[in-house]
Amino acid sequence: MSTLLEAALATLVFCAPGYPGAAGDAQPLVDQFASAAVAASGWPAGSLAAVYDPTEDGGLAKLNGADAVLAFVPYPFFVEHAAQLHLTALVQADVVDVGPQQRWTLVAKNGRVTGPASMAGFTILSTAGYAPNFVRRSALEGWALPLDVKIEATGQILSALRKVAAGEPVAVLLDQTQATALATLPFAADIKTVMQSPQLPVAIIVVVDSRVAPAKARALQAALLKMGQGSAGGDALGALHLRGFVPAKLPTPAPAP
């Protein structure tokens, strides 16, 4: 697709499937971030709008619009849709209390799962369950899950963990924050860590389908990498629970079976 014209209004799409937050509540925060990014990068004032969508389908619909030139997405979304949407990583988010990378943790009933084969007939529940390629090829890389394992999305992680503790054929894939909180649950002793992923990016900002001219993309990238190092953009970062950005270093997902 041809590069977006300099004078055209461009959109930065924030999409965070599986995590709480309504579009109306988030809109002032993403607007603030877009304005700070434009000011820092030297793009024309008002040339970048922002929109938030908490659903996978809604985010995909917005990213298919011709005005969607950038996206801020969780890494599972990137793995699942990068090829389809022609996403190119620009920077990696450095998230408060997590960092730029995290490990995903697969948990199951204590003593129930002894290896991949023992998960036959199981369902894996996760906030990242909308991205089965991420679950199988990135988070559980090296685990040859049985073909009948189902992968489903849920935002109700506590309910999912209760199913695990009750002995249902369920495992839960937790992000780093969720895994850290596991020990505080009264039934934590009934749940065992089965495996952990390698360190994986938390979230990234990407260029969509080469819709940003290379020079403008480089200017934005340089500006984002400097945000958080001083006072500039600090409020916009803090509102989104970010410390700043780091260069994108993305692992190569395991090949599809």
Image (spheres, rainbow, N blue to C red):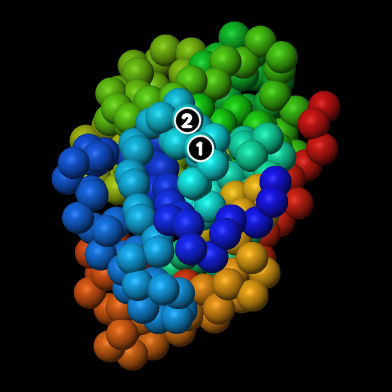
Does residue 20 show up?
Answer: yes
* Drawn side of residue 96 relative to residue 203, left or right: left
Q: List x then y, in percent, for residue 130.
A: 50, 27
Question: Can you name the residue that lies furthest to the bottom here?
Answer: 230
Does residue 171 show up?
Answer: no
Nearest to the eye among marks 2 and 1: give it.
1
* Drawn side of residue 186 relative to residue 165, left or right: left
* Drawn side of residue 41 relative to residue 80, left or right: left
Placement of 218 over or under 4, stated as above or below? below
Instruction: State the CA–CA distance, disc 2 to disc 1.
Output: 7 Å
Occupied quadrant, residue 88: bottom right
Q: Residue at x 29, y 27 (%)?
A: 156
Occupied quadrant, residue 174: top left
Q: Please say if the residues under marks 2 and 1 sit with CB atoms less than 8 Å apart.
A: yes
Placement of 131 over or under 82, stated as above or below? above
- Residue that mark 1 sits on: 65
| Foreground pick, 105 / 96 | 96
| Foreground pick, 139 / 165 | 139
Q: List x then y, in percent, for residue 46.
A: 33, 66
* Three-letter amino acid code at the position of disc 1: Gly
Picture quarter with the C terminus: top right
Q: Residue at x 58, y 72 (%)?
A: 216
Placement of 125 over or under 195, stated as above or below? above
Instruction: Kindly identify which numbered label has been placed on residue 61.
Output: 2
Q: List x then y, in percent, for residue 245.
A: 47, 72
Placement of 25 over or under 39, stated as above or below? above
| Foreground pick, 235 / 67 | 67
| Foreground pick, 210 / 7 | 7
Q: Residue at x 48, y 63 (%)?
A: 7
* Three-letter amino acid code at the position of disc 2: Ala
